[in-house]
Amino acid sequence: MKIKIAKIRVMKIESLRACRNNVKSILIVLGILCVFTPRAFAVTYTLYTEVLPPYSFVGGPQKGVAVDIASTLFERAGIPFEVKITPWKRAYVTVSETANTCFFPVQRNQEREVFFRWVSPLYISQTAFYGLKGDGIKVRTLQDAKSLRIGSYNGSAAAEYLDGIGYDVKTVVNDKQNIKKLDRKRIDLWAGDPLSVRYFSGLEGVELDEKLVYFTTLRALACSLQTPEKIVEKLQKELNAMYADGTIDNILNSYQ
């Protein structure tokens, strides 16, 4: 009788060991699935941008410089995403309040720094004063533009800077309106970046003169503060790699 009891105890112990080993095997398999199939468990990020040719377009064969850079960045990082076109102010508020969202291209400055988590620079841009060719306006220093009417677009850090130091800045939703206003002499100067200026002046057939480059800024991806640090680090690492292997230059050159 004692022998039978001993045998039963041994069998129970062996069963428990087998069960424990099965649990370990299941956990290992689940761990492997988590490592090698991240898309099955990853969150989809919503990336907001505004209509800002040539940086972002609606329709047509080209998506825009900024859209191409941001899309390539998320694809290479293996993070699911979708791009949505929305007005700049709405994008700003949405990303300020909503997890798993980012917007671009945002001019990164001190005032905005604490409200978002940043991946930058998507690219570096300059802002200059442009006027009609042969208009006789001379701008050698920033002070020379103080008494003139200046056009820019909503959300421009360069425009916010000028407005903050007392310049007469008139902003519009889209830079396309600025080239028209300049041509009709409703503004004296257009504060724009070279890529946008070349695009719109060519589109409208208006010849312009560059007066003075006065502002250099980082154009960045701004994400909600709820974005995990590991996601920000992964995106930044991949963006650095895109500069190193020439991807950023190739995208920029395709829109020159």
Image (cartoon, rainbow, N blue to C red):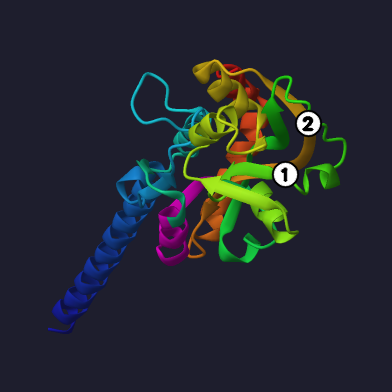
190 in magenta: no
In the image, residue 231 above or below residue 150: below
Percent x, y for residue 121? 65, 42
Percent x, y for residue 222? 54, 52
Which residue in the protein does label 1 denote? 148
Percent x, y for residue 215? 75, 42
Q: Residue at x 30, y 46 (%)?
A: 40
For badge 2, the amino acid type reads Ile
Q: Can residue 154 be seen in this snapshot?
A: yes
Please identify the residue farthest to the bottom as the structure is shown. Answer: 2
Q: Are the two marked residues, 2 and 1, in contact with CB atoms closer than 8 angstroms? A: yes
Label 1 crowd (10 A; few <14 / some 14-19 / many >=20): some
Q: Can residue 157 be seen in this snapshot?
A: no
Q: Is residue 138 left or right of residue 93?
A: right
* Quarter occupied by residue 122: top right
* Quarter occupied by residue 207: top right
Mark pair 2, 1: CA separation: 10 Å
Label 2 crowd (10 A; few <14 / some 14-19 / many >=20): some
Q: Is residue 249 left or right of residue 9?
A: right
Which residue in the protein does label 2 denote? 137
Q: Residue at x 67, y 52 (%)?
A: 168
Q: Residue at x 82, y 44 (%)?
A: 142
Q: How many marks?
A: 2
Percent x, y for residue 62? 42, 21
Q: Earlier in the sequence, mark 2 or mark 1?
A: 2
- Pick whichever, 29 or 156, lies toward us: 156
Looking at the rendered structure, the secondary structure element under dot 2 is: loop
What's the magenta region? 90-105
